[in-house]
Image (spheres, rainbow, N blue to C red):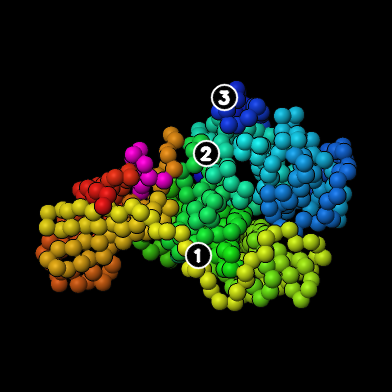
Amino acid sequence: MLRSSLAAAVLLVATLAPATPASAATGPCRLAGTAGLADLVPGDSTLGLSALQPSAVGLPSQIHLRGTTETFNRRWSFALRAGRIHVKEAAASGGWRVMALPDCLAGHVTGISVDDDELVALDEDGAIYTMDHALNAPWTWNWTHRYGAPLWLGGGNTVPYHSARWTWSVLSPGEDKVWRDTAGNDHPAGGAKVSHVFALNEDGSRITYVDPWLPADHSYEMATPLGGRFQAEALSTAASTSFVINRYGDMYTRLYDFDIAGSDRIFFSYSYEDQRGAAFPKIQLPAPGWMRQPKIPGQVTDRISIHKTGVGSDARELRVEGGDQGRTGYWGKALTASGWTFTPTGEHLEGHGLQNTAADRSADTLAPPSPYDYGGALGQVTARVEEFDVAVGATPLILRAGGQELRLTLHTVDGLRQSPQAPGLTSQPRSFYGTVEVPQAVLDGLDSYDPALRALVRDRLGSARFTDTDVVVTDRTMTLARLDLPLNRT
């Protein structure tokens, strides 16, 4: 994979180059570290653990849910107390020790999250620090402040929204090996992993992610369910599978990251054409959508967790803190299982209780629709795009002429960029990879449409189901290059 080759280049460049100056928001630490370089082969050694000081604070014997104060991967459990990180073997009952941290981080950590072989910690300013080799022995662990373009060599980044509801995700060739697209085809996880911090905004309706290979901004988003209007109370992500829950206990999961979305066109090939049965399938677009999970038949809190359990994108386990018949613990299920089972722990419930209802109330607390409507004309044809949202991948493109209406779909995917972009839509032009989809029924009955509509589909779209086009959007204008169609905010 090309990512493998670039990762090897990173190994050389990062070893020889001094740390890139960080912004003021990234704090005083200037840690080079090995995150983003070649991974070690995971082993079972605990070398260096016994040299760490035994923990003198009260900690649970086991960590059952991944969060930002307690978290785990396949090998280790981590807990945050008073700015310091404690660690133990995940399979052991107790045996906590105080992790050795760089002086500038010790006592200043405000949140942690681990997935695969990388652990992320935040300081008081929300700056991101990454510990590498988290599937290996403690003597190999090291930290970096580096984050962002180019190739994880940037000067650092912060968690979006200064959110307390954030999570770290790593999809890797070593642990996950493959992921499955909507055509049922398995694709390699890539040679250099896909690592993201995902974060919820204040009202829970927007999820922003920051990738250590992308610009140090907060511009990339994944839509929440129901067209980006679902309001989540909590978020957990592992190996690019996100898990959300609302105040009524409605839960959804989605496999999504920068590569899966269709944004990484330098390294991967994508297609909206049906890839089922293809000899050399491209990655099927659109990316997998949100999958509604069955309701839990009992008490739940907003403390939710997802973790990887093996090879492939279905190898995930969901857990939700809660109670059953007076017992406390957590509800759990495999990602694709039809029902939940309860595991009692006897531990005090730490999350906020939710009004868990048997009925689906996903739509009862929706954020307002996007206010960005655009309209214009191309000869005798008027065009309209309503409620455009940068995070939503499909938007109706409505064409009208001669009293007839033609409803197409405008697919948009955030483009790959190496310079910072402002979040959302502003006066700064924002470029998307666009594709116009014409329903097959429209193509089959094209002769019945107004001549102006017919000509547009035949001449500008080549009578094809899918036509790629550059799309450039600001808070005032939208341009669809292939249609030569400028639209203005209405």
Q: Is residue 295 magenta?
A: no
Q: Is residue 471 above or below residue 459?
A: above
Where on the picture, by quarter, is residue 14?
top right
Question: Which callout, 2 or 1, points at the residue further toward the start of the chain?
Answer: 2
Q: Position of residue 468 (x, y in %)?
A: 30, 52
Question: Which callout, 1 or 3, points at the residue further toward the start of the chain?
Answer: 3
What residue is shown with label 2?
213
Kind of residue at badge 2: Trp
488 horizontally vs 287: left or right: left
Q: Position of residue 305 (x, y in %)?
A: 66, 59
Q: Nearer the viewer, mark 1 or mark 3?
A: 1
Q: Is residue 427 magenta?
A: yes
Q: Circle 3: is it few (<14), some (14-19), or many (20+) Cα within 10 Å?
A: few
The residue at the point 75 percent across, 29 percent down is: 103
Q: Give 223 or 18, whichever is nearer the viewer.
A: 223
Considering the numbered disc 3 on the image, is that residue within a helix, a strand or a loop? loop
The residue at the point 47 percent across, 49 percent down is: 221
Kind of residue at badge 1: Thr
Question: What range of the chain is rendered magenta?
Answer: 424-433
The residue at the point 74 percent across, 31 percent down is: 102
Mark 3–mark 2 CB contact (< 8 Å): no
What residue is shown with label 3?
21
What residue is shown with label 1?
365
